[in-house]
Image: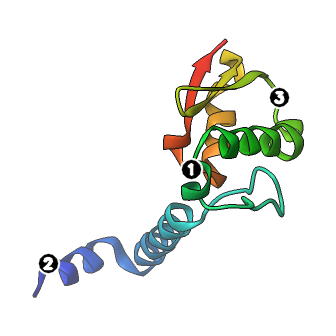
Amino acid sequence: MGTGQQFVKKIGSFGSFVFLLLFVLFFIICFSSGKDPIPGYESPHEASYYFQNEHTLSELKTELETNVFPHLTGIRDCRVSDGKLVITIESSSFASNRSAILRYYEESLFEFVHA
């Protein structure tokens, strides 16, 4: 008798059912993408577009201030500096806001700072 068969025999049919149910739930939780922070929002350009120059980074700043930041709380400041957007976020909402922004844009475009 194989190891798997011994395991099933020891836990019985109800235990096997619970084991399979937990296994399926594990996969659903691991591979589901979670709630969209800004429903229906999509980045208007690829990251390579914003890397072109300071002007395109300023466009990204305007895009964030117009369409993203109004849906987030705790954004203190956003400015272009050294080829990146520096976003200052309150500590209480830092992780969630950073995660929401990075869902739509590449991390290398930004520098995130705690307020």
Residue 92 to residue 28: above or below: above
Q: Position of residue 89 (x, y in %)?
A: 69, 21
Amino acid type at mark 2: Thr
* Image position, residue 82 (x, y; %): 52, 26
Nearest to the observer: residue 102 or residue 93: 102
First-in-chain label (2 vs 3): 2
Q: Where is the N terminus found, in terms of image quarters?
A: bottom left
Q: Measuring 69% from the left and 35% from the top, which residue is drawn there?
A: 97
Question: In the rendered image, which quarter is residue 60 located in?
Answer: top right
- The tag on residue 3 is 2
In this view, 21 is above or below 43: below
Badge 2 element: helix
Q: Nearer the viewer, mark 2 or mark 3?
A: 3
First of labels 3, 1 by sequence position:
1
46 and 8: which one is in front?
A: 46
How crowded pointer 1 is (Cα within 10 Å; few <14, some 14-19, many 20+) is rated as few
Image side of residue 76 versus residue 26, left or right: right
Image position of 34 with respect to 52: above or below: below
Q: Mark 2 vs mark 1: which is more N-terminal? A: 2
- Cα–Cα span, label 3 and label 1: 29 Å
Q: Which residue is mark 1?
A: 52
Q: How is the image coloured?
A: rainbow
Q: Check the image and report above or below for 103 versus 23.
A: above
At 76% from the left edge and 50% from the top edge, which residue is drawn? Answer: 37
Classify mark 3: helix, strand or loop.
loop
- Indicate which disc residue 73 carries: 3
For the C terminus, give its image quadrant: top right
User: Marks 2 and 3, how far apart in space?
Assistant: 53 Å
Left or right side of 40 for 113: left
